[in-house]
Image (spheres, rainbow, N blue to C red):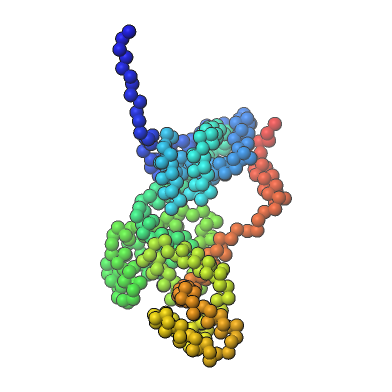
Amino acid sequence: MGNKKKVQKPGGPKQSPPPLNPDEDPYWKVSTENLDPRKGTQYIERFVNYQVRFPQWFEDISSGVPTYYAVLGLLKGFSKEALQSAYEQECKLSTYPDDSIEEAYRVLSDLQLRVKYDEFLIRFEHATRYSPAHMIEGLKKAHDEFLKNALIIRKLGDFAQEHHDYMYLISKGMPSIFEYSGLKHGCSDGEIDKYASSGDELSVLISSIMRDPKKREQFANYDTFIETSSNEDAKEQIRNLQKRWKELDPRLVRKILQMSLQDSEQMVDIFERIEKILSLNHDWKEYLPPSEKSFFSIFGVDEHISSLPKSEAESLLRARYRTLERTPEVNLAYTVLKNPTLRDEYIWMSHHYELKQIDDFITEEEKSPDELNDAQIQKLIAEKLRQFEKTYGRFP
């Protein structure tokens, strides 16, 4: 017997192939044959059947959303670690709908679902052989638009992390630095100097951005992204929100824009904290700005009482409390002011409560229409089926 050398099996974790470029989607395939749909009824029907079993897949692919591999930027053969990393990155900032990102992660995390999804992509390609040319062109255009925007997001690079709040608020109608300052993307140094001459803090901050070519390009890229990437419904929502911003006190707009340029990932936390404090202390509302009455004014003190030693602050409050009539209002104010934790929360709310009106109109604009009842859902399904039959012919 000859001596056979044992083959060493490679060890270590599975090596993942390199990530996809944002503008690549090798698994999205459509046919340009434009064959008679009456001859491809079985292929069309097999594809349409996925609308019932996997409605999210059907909706995404029919809307031009790239394949779930492209959504997460992965080639087949990816590792578990690469999938998790891609998902977390996409959740931070993406051009894709949240539902599509979640479904992409769910499908690619499950081997059985992934096999079914790969089969779905084949069915989709077969169905496009019997689709009208104008439908295929519309799909291609929508698909290319998604990939183009994904590439823009990637090019924004560190901008997304450094200016998360700015990007969020611009998408919710806040004026951009260009709109607010009146400066154009290609403004001259002289125009920047003239704008900065007012000397206020926000003007100086915006001017410093405009003087930095890399930063100015990043802000301009995001400006362009917002203008070109949104569908008509999203654009209409932004226009409605922009009208609401114009109704705000200019001082408040200036304050929020400045905050968004100086801090990242703070604004959403502020909105959430305001809601949490109010849910626990709903009786504070009438003692917060713009009301002239506050817990401090009721006791004839100001918020600087917090800088006093604890015993001295307590003594002062007790002395004032003895001289006041014990009304519910006085008792509430005393309860808050004598407790250092509640007092600090109230001071914080006094400084940030005016921001709630922004959160309120954003939430109001984002509210979806009344939920559909079963009859309305059945009506929509029937309408969709009629559209397919009109395009492809009635199924036998």
Q: Residue furthest bottom?
A: 323
Q: Position of residue 299 (x, y in %)?
A: 50, 86
Could you tell whether 186 is left or right of 244 in the image? left
Q: Residue at x 27, y 67 (%)?
A: 189
Q: Residue furthest right?
A: 375
Q: Nearer the viewer, residue 318 or 97?
A: 318
Q: Position of residue 6 (x, y in %)?
A: 33, 19
Q: Residue furthest top?
A: 1
Q: Position of residue 62 (x, y in %)?
A: 55, 42
Q: Nearer the viewer, residue 2 or 111?
A: 2
Q: Residue at x 33, y 76 (%)?
A: 200
Residue 114 higher or lower than 308, as above or below = above
Q: Nearer the viewer, residue 349 or 91?
A: 349
Q: Position of residue 233 (x, y in %)?
A: 55, 56
* Residue 183 location, quadrant: bottom left
Residue 248 higher or lower than 72, as above or below = below
* Residue 34 location, quadrant: top right
The quadrant in which the C terminus is found is: top right
Q: Nearer the viewer, residue 103 or 246?
A: 103
Q: Residue at x 66, y 39 (%)?
A: 389
Q: Residue at x 49, y 74 (%)?
A: 342
Residue 144 can be seen, yes or no = no
